[in-house]
Image (cartoon, helix red, strand yellow):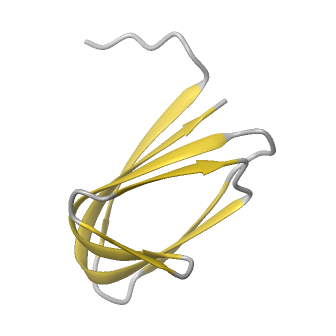
Amino acid sequence: MVKVHQDVTFLVGHLRSGDEIVQNLDPGRRAFLYVIEGEIGLGDESLAAGDQARIVDPRRLELTGRVDAEVILIDLA
């Protein structure tokens, strides 16, 4: 068991090629996105397995599966 002493949410998802996911976040949040496998689009950026993105004060994240992919999104204060 892992205890986290922070306002945080961990999301794990699988995107197939062509899938689109929109994740809305509250103001003042930060997001960390890790691509475990495959390839996704994050807005205009391409991220492949092993890539990560650190996003400050995101309001809306738009993810698109370019190749079947698995991702972890961490939403924290």
Q: Is residue 54 above or below residue 70?
A: above
In the depicted view, which residue is nearer to us: 21 or 48?
48
**Image point 32% across, 57% down: which residue?**
71
Q: Is residue 65 above or below residue 1?
A: below
**Image point 56% across, 46% down: which residue?**
31
Q: In the picture, which quadrant includes the N terminus? A: top left
In the depicted view, which residue is nearer to us: 56 or 77?
56
- Residue 32 lies, in percent from the top left, at 48, 45
- Residue 26 lies, in percent from the top left, at 76, 45
- Residue 8 lies, in percent from the top left, at 55, 28
Q: In the picture, which quadrant includes the C terminus? A: top right
Left or right: 65 in relation to 29: left
**Image point 35% across, 80% down: which residue?**
65
**Image point 51% across, 34% down: which residue?**
9
Extreme-right residue of the structure:
27
- Residue 41 lies, in percent from the top left, at 43, 78
Q: Is residue 58 above or below residue 75?
A: below
